[in-house]
Amino acid sequence: MAAVSVQFPPSEDVLAPTASFAPVPQHIVDECHDTIMAAAAKVPTESLDPVTTSVHHKRNVFDMFRLDGRVAVITGGARGLGYSMAEGLCAAGLSGIAILDLQTDLGESACKQLHSEYGVSARFYRLDVRDEVAVQDAMDSVVRDLGKIDILILSAGVADLVHAEDYSPAKFRRVIDINLNGSFVCAQAAGQHMIAAGRGGSIIFIGSMSGSIVNWPNPQSAYNASKAGVIHLMKSLSAEWAQHHIRCNSISPGYMDTPLNTAYEETYFKEWKSRTPMGRLGQPEELAGCALWLASDASSFCTGSDILIDGGYTVL
């Protein structure tokens, strides 16, 4: 429901001088005012436009980015892009965060660091996103331990550089299973909790510019196909779950300076930089602002959008 501002004229005649209507009696003005305000008071707060906190007063734009009292789950959040986005959300006031990752040491260390720096309740759950039973158990555990799930960031992913003619079906399936199927299984499990709770939520998929274009000269057909699937999966769920007030969007990074890419520093970094108009790789923290916007009420009318953060790579 959009906020409505109602103004009442003074009781004296405010019409043009040519009008000859009698002034409205003050007691009628007062009765109308009281009736409207009483009706407004009965409107549930959660049904109001999130851009306003009351019928009268707009929220400060910076307050719209706050995440106080909310709980986030981040897959692949032990390091790299996932951890940087976790930091961004914690800085905005999260009450709880769950890091889901295969790497136990890194995941536990990440949670300790987030708790130490931001005072947030942080939990680590070891998880292979390909295991749907384990995924469901992990999401159930998050709700049990932290109370709810408001935000999900799907950052777990892998990449291979293998020429298509040499790609084994098993290796190709692994990329699809982790990047695409894993994203669906995690979104489904978290979405079920969001729907049951009736509060809505925000699900942020991590796509890639590779879901929109073909990187060259990288031989990465499985990765490209998986990320194109992730983006369209996001759009499909955004349409299905809008009725539940669950927003689904994706962030599609360009070449980023992450552990996933450092293995190719000697062979590809120079080429990647030369093909990027900004002339460099992105830093992990450069996704945090977008993730915070999508997670917060600041993006309350945004769903089904894929946001490219690629230094201009895809405009050429």
Image (cartoon, rainbow, N blue to C red):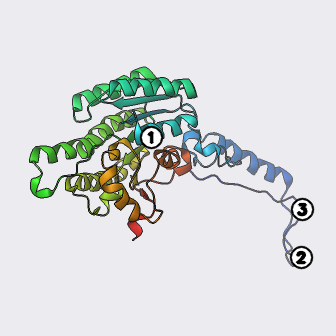
Q: How many marks?
A: 3
Local crowd size for mark 2, using a 10 Å CA cut-off: few (<14), some (14–19), many (≥20)? few
Query: Could you tell me the amino acid type at mark 1?
Result: Gly
> Please, what secondary structure does the residue beneath circle 2 have?
loop
Going from N to C along the chain, the mark reached first, 2 or 3, is 3
Query: Could you tell me the amino acid type at mark 2?
Result: Pro
Q: Can residue 44 be seen in this snapshot?
A: no
The residue at 47%/41% (across/down) is: 85
For the residues labelled 1 and 3, say whether their Cβ atoms are less than 8 Å apart. Answer: no
The residue at 46%/29% (across/down) is: 97
Marks 2 and 3 sit apart, C-alpha to C-alpha, by 12 Å
Going from N to C along the chain, the mark reached first, 2 or 1, is 2
Image coordinates for residue 120, horizontal then vertical, percent: 53, 26
> Please, what secondary structure does the residue beneath circle 3 have?
loop
Query: Could you tell me the amino acid type at mark 3?
Result: Glu
Residue that numbered label 2 is attached to: 17
Q: Tell me: 6 left or right of 15.
A: left
Residue that numbered label 1 is attached to: 200
Marks 1 and 3 sit apart, C-alpha to C-alpha, by 48 Å
The mark closer to the camera, 2 or 1, is 1
